[in-house]
Amino acid sequence: QVQLVESGGGLVQPGGSLRLSCAASGIIFKIYAMGWYRQAPGKQRELVARITSGGNTNYADSVKGRFTISRDNAKNTVYLQMNSLKPEETAVYYCNADASTLSGYRDYWGQGTQVTVSS
């Protein structure tokens, strides 16, 4: 099993910044892609950004140029730097990881961290 623990969420004013972190733990053979998704009230969960083990990234069009995803493979940790936040980006942000363990290959989800953008 893989446990993903997110941190860094909170309340921020429009135009402000937050940095989310997600650390993976457990008996892990390899973590492949890691990513961040978000789900606003009444909406479906959507991809925010994703990064492969080799560092290739992709972003939702709505966050390009404002958000940056990065990872520290030695620490099994992925980060999301969010700048110029907008009220409509208020959501629960979830960490995701594709990993191989003793149980095989599958994807894992964190519990989520609330991000509220409001004045």
Image: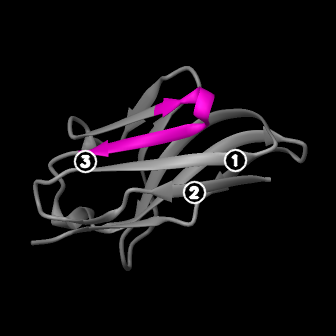
Question: Of all residues shown, which one is farthest toward the front?
Answer: 75
Distance Cα–Cα, label 3 vs label 1: 30 Å
Quarter the C terminus occupies? bottom left
Question: What residue is pinned by disc 1?
Answer: 25
Identity of the residue drawn at 56% across and 20% down:
54
Amino acid type, callout 2? Val
Start-end of magenta stretch: 71-82
- The reply to whether the C-beta atoms of the residues labelled 2 and 1 are less than 8 Å apart is yes
Distance Cα–Cα, label 2 vs label 3: 25 Å
Residue 70 screen position, x and y as percent: 43, 32
96, above or below 91, in the image: above
Of pointers 2 and 1, the one earlier in the residue sequence: 2
Q: Nearer the viewer, mark 3 or mark 1?
A: 1
Q: Main secondary structure of the magenta part?
A: strand
Residue 3 screen position, x and y as percent: 69, 55
Colour scheme employed for the rendering of this structure: one colour
